[in-house]
Image (spheres, grey):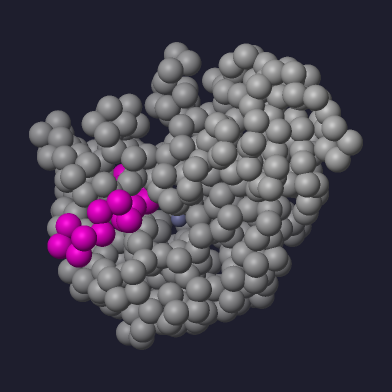
Amino acid sequence: VTARLLVKNVRPMGGPRVDLLVERGRIRERRAGIGVEGSMESVDGDGRLVLPGLVDGHMHLDKTFWGLPWRPHEAGPGLIDRIETERRLRAELRLSPASQSARLARQAIANGTTHIRTHVDVDMEVGLAGLDGLVATRKALADAVTIQIVAFPQSGVMTRPGTLELLEEAVRQGADLLGGLDPAGIDGDPKGQLDGIFAIAQRHGVGIDIHLHDPGELGAFQVELIAERTKALGLQGRVAISHAFCLGMLDGDRFGGLVERLVDNRIAIMTHAPGDRPFPPIRSLRAAGVTLFSGSDGVRDAWTPYGNADMLERAMLLGYRSAFRRDEEILLALEMVTVGGATVMGVEGYGLEVNCPADFVVVDGDAPAEAVISRPRRALVVKGGRVVAREGVAVV
Ligand SMILES: [Zn+2]
């Protein structure tokens, strides 16, 4: 780590040109005309934009095929087809969660991601092998990216006895949060799954991030159950619902009532802008005060051949699917992959101000909205004051 890093001639969020002096992992000065001293490493930003470190709030690092030869997609269209195809491929390919997660995390770093929340499969077949791999990657890349791990019951909870105990063991062994999966659609026992995971969360003082794909009223009913439990256990601000397709499928009154519960209990919503189905309406949720964030979700795995761990591209997809055209709308999408994700992950001091941790990305472009649209190569990525990628290539 260079003791002092001076990034000259850059425009934080497209504002006026300044120099950023980074010392002991933080931005210490932000002004024009900082002189270079002998002990500094100096980089000329040439008038480029600086964005805060990108936040990928929903990955599945443990099961990507990233870095392996191309595999044509094999699964059928349903959720169960995908789960079963994945289980078969997992056995056939014997992927190493440690090396696969490190490969994809490095790709994310190269794309300017400084914070990742990843789900990791925990079920009666893989046990905690995925978690062990992720814990190893989290440690190996600790100086280059912050990784938060969610213990994720990919095969269901109540239908697979023993899973709850395994999830609790995952928390003891280093998972930061508890996950869940369609308590009704997968388990047919919404109260059972939710009571089970909320009880573990409360015992261990961890947050919750639940995959909820169930559509329409079935999904809406479970959002209510999640909100009730969040309130009863005092977990406000520590619960997220990922996907929540149902929020894009309800009529005005029903939608409004649910939004009120989300806001009251500070439940965050993650959407990755799915290609083929209704999804949470970003503009109206944001206007109501719901915390929104985004993530890659699966990248090149048994679930999908798509994805490249690029959160500027994800912001572009969020904007594209939302028909955002004006800069202030496109900035809502950018906010989801920056401030929104940082809020959900509880990142302290996130931003580009003096004394913020020096986590940022330098890219070409006139304005932040342009960076979302053109997804330029990441010229420089700094994490904790350390250069972790240059010209689109991770150097860690
Ligand atoms: Zn997911």
Q: Is residue 243 magenta?
A: yes
Magenta region, residue range: 231-245
Residue 379 visible, this orientation: no
**311 sits to left or right of 71:** left
* 379 vs 374, nearest the viewer: 379
Residue at 53% x, 44% y is 55
How many tags in the picture?
0
* 187 vs 14, nearest the viewer: 14
* Image-quadrant location for residue 226: bottom left
Residue at 20% x, 64% y is 233
* Image-quadrant location for residue 225: bottom left
Find residue 167 and report its horizontal and vertical position in percent.
Answer: 40, 77
Residue 147 visible, this orientation: yes
Find residue 364 and report its horizontal and vertical position in percent.
Answer: 71, 22
Residue at 69% x, 48% y is 24
* Image-quadrant location for residue 130: bottom right
Question: Where is ligand 1, by quadrant?
Answer: bottom left
* 264 vs 85, nearest the viewer: 264
* 88 vs 360, nearest the viewer: 360
Q: Quadrant of the C terminus?
A: bottom right
**185 sits to left or right of 26:** left
Q: Classify 48 as above or below 242.
A: above
